[in-house]
Structure formats: C-alpha cells, structure tokens
Amino acid sequence: MRKFLCVAFVPFMYSFYYSQGTKKTVPCYDLSSVLKVEPTALYKSHLDASKSFGVKLLTDSKTVQKYINSGKFHKIKKSGKGYRVQKLDYSRAYMVSKAKATLEKMASRFSKETKGRTFTVSSITRTLEDQCRLRRVNSNASMGISSHNYGNSFDISYIRFNDVLKYNPKMEVALEKVLKYYATAGRIYYIKERQQSCYHITVRNY
C-alpha cells in the first residue's frame, strides 16, 4: 500500500445485547484485526513518533476525556494566526501540547510568508470509534491504526485557503515550503494524500 489515507478507519458493526437487564454495547471495531494491519515503511515512522508521547491508543470518548482531565490533551482553537479548523464531524480538536504548539508555529510562519493568508485544518485527533463512523461514508479507507489515534497528528487541506475551496497552486507551494522547513528541522513527518487532497502531518517528540 503506497498511500496512507488521511482518514484511517476499521470495519464497523454495532451490536447490542442485554445482560441482567443492563444494555451493553459491543465495540464497533475488532482490535485484534486492527493491530494485525502492517503499516507501510513510509508510515511506520509516523506511528513510532506517535507512540513516543506516552499516549495509549485512543479507543473511545472516555480515553480522550481521561487525557483531557489529566492535562495531557489541549484544546485547539477554531482559528488562529494563519489557520482555520473546519467543522470536525469525525475527529476531535485536542492534541498533546507539542503538537498544538507546532501547528500554531507552522500556521504563523505560513501567514508571514503569504501576507496573512490562512490554511485549513481538516482533521485532528480520532478514536477507533470515530473511525468506525467514518467507515460508513468512506469504504476505501485504510484498515489499520492511524497516528490520529494518539493525539499528535492533523491534516491540512491543500485545496482550501482563506476558507475558500479552490485549487490555489501558489498557496499550495507556500504550504509545502513550510512543511519542508519543519520536516528538515526534525519537528514533523508529512505525507501528501492526493486522494483526500490534504497533507497528513505527524508531530515528532523533539
């Protein structure tokens, strides 16, 4: 598999059963099957970076809330200098502090180099259950674990700048220049996902 899709999810099936009068929910993913999926050589570095932050695989809302309560996860504002976050239907606007700070620095640099333009963050942190829901609308998604499942990855659209959905080659070049700068500095890994029209960025624990 040469490409890693910007959205990564697993097969879903919601099942409910009653036990002693209490309704329980069976997870919509098969963790053993998810763990069996081998990442590509290119993507393995993203997963290794994600696992270095001390965050366990995010399975559901409770695991995310645990890291919010402990102060490990920090809220990402809807907008800031150089960036906007689009409506997130299948991800959550929280990341570890280093990822949050890196996003803000990248956006500020982009704004400076483009005289005030903004890029659009299209996806942030996901749980395995979030990926189940995504699977309903995109059956072509990757089946394995995503670096989005650890709170240090986000996606940036390369066809939406200044809140306008339109291909802008000049802005795309400017964005990639910023990405290359941070990758060369050892701060991030990134992959261009043409099918999803975005860059998948994983922040390293530098």
Image (cartoon, rainbow, N blue to C red):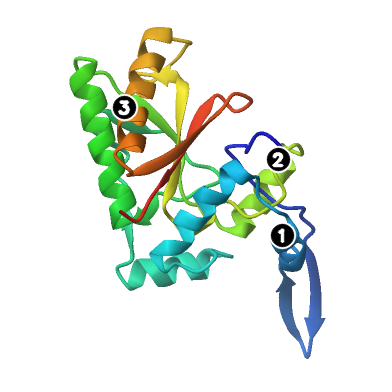
Callout 3 amino acid: Val
Q: Residues within 10 Å of mark 2 (few under 14, many from 20)?
A: some
Depth-wise, is mark 1 or mark 3 nearer the camera? Answer: 3
Nearer-N-terminus badge (2/1): 1
Tell me the residue that label 3 is attached to: 178
Q: Residue 141 shows which numbered tag? A: 2
Q: CB of mark 3 within 8 Å of CB of mark 2? A: no
Secondary structure at numbered mark 2: loop
Residue 137 located left or right of residue 74: right
The N terminus: image quadrant: top right
| Mark 3 neighbour class, 10 Å CA radius: few under 14, some 14 to 19, many 20 or more | some
For the point 62% across and 45% down, which residue is it? 41
Quadrant of the rendered image containing residue 55: bottom left
Q: Residues within 10 Å of mark 1 (few under 14, many from 20)?
A: some
Residue sitting at x 36%, y 36%: 183
Viewer-proximal residue among 194 and 118: 194
Q: Secondary structure at mark 1?
A: helix
